[in-house]
Image: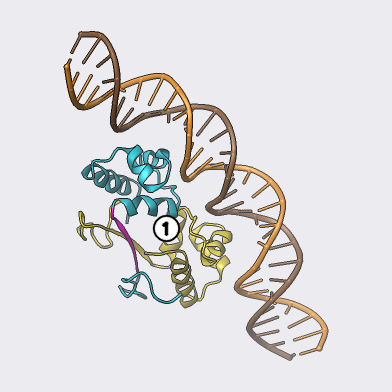
Chain colours: A cyan, B yellow, C orange, D brown
Amino acid sequence: MAQSQQLAEVIRLHRKVARLSRVQLAELAGVGKTVIYNIEHGKESVQLDTLQKILNVLNIKIALTSPLMDDLQAPENEKS
Amino acid sequence: MAQSQQLAEVIRLHRKVARLSRVQLAELAGVGKTVIYNIEHGKESVQLDTLQKILNVLNIKIALTSPLMDDLQAPENEKS
DNA sequence: TAACATTTACCTCTATAGCGGCAATATACA
DNA sequence: TGTATATTGCCGCTATAGAGGTAAATGTTA
């Protein structure tokens, strides 16, 4: 998925639809505005947890899939 | 998805199934072994691109989903 | 058991992610 | 039009991700 440019566009699209400025999004996510700027400019070097905070605000979910798991990782809680 | 512990387990499970040591996986992914150690120990602060290199070797894919996109962001072809 | 091989744990150090600040640019309203 | 106001672009600095090294642990074979 999300090779730089694509992630950039996904973020930007969702941000735009949500009518948020970068600063607003950053504040809601609890991160700096720089990271949003960077992502939207195609920078892939983003911390996963930072990205998750942002995706969270935009109501975007990350799912891992593999032949091994197929889709049985849907729920996101259980075990540990 | 992947809240620390879960990501840790997904990685570890796939690595084990693939019969790879951390060092081997690290080399295949072109990253240091430290990051794999960290991930498997529940550290969420991992670079997205670094994580992708690892997931790539383990044949795990990341998908972004949202009400906006639903699942129209194509399974596993992706450009570039 | 010892001796060796493989894997994991943890340390130190360097490159850099991402923070806040401010300038530049865009938008809105009188 | 001018002047607030909001948004974006970019810079410098600091905390830290993650590289490699090595010790500890674990496994293997005689």
The residue shown at (39%, 67%) is B59
Chain on which label 1 sits: B
Residue at 32%, 57% (x, y): give it.
A1
Left or right, B1 with reference to C20: left
User: Can residue A39 be seen?
Assistant: no
Looking at this view, is B59 or D10 the one in front?
A: D10
The correct choice, above or below, for A71 with respect to A4 in the image is below
**Residue range highlighted in magenta:** A59-65
Q: Measured from the top left, where is residue B38 in percent x and y?
A: 55, 62
Q: Is residue A18 something that shows in the picture?
A: yes
Instruction: From the viewer's side, name the closer residue of D13 and B35.
Output: D13
Q: Quadrant of residue D29?
A: bottom right
Apparent side of residue A39 relative to residue D24 in the rendered image (left or right): left
Quarter-of-image position of residue A48: bottom left
In the image, is residue B5 part of the stretch drawn in magenta? Answer: no
Helix, strand or loop at disc 1?
A: helix
Q: Quadrant of the N terminus of chain B?
A: bottom left
Q: Which residue is mark 1?
A: B52
Taking depth in this image into account, of B68 and A65 the one nearest to the observer is B68
- Left of A11 or right of it: where is A78? right
Q: Residue at x 33, y 40 (%)?
A: A24
Rendered view: C30 above or below B37: above
At a point 35% along the width and 63% down the height, the residue shown is B61
Q: Position of residue C12 (x, y in %)?
A: 72, 51
Percent x, y for residue A80? 46, 74
Label 1 is placed on what type of residue?
A: Gln
Q: Is residue A73 above or below residue D7?
A: below
Q: Residues within 10 Å of mark 1 (few under 14, many from 20)?
A: many
* Displayed quadrant of residue B3: bottom left
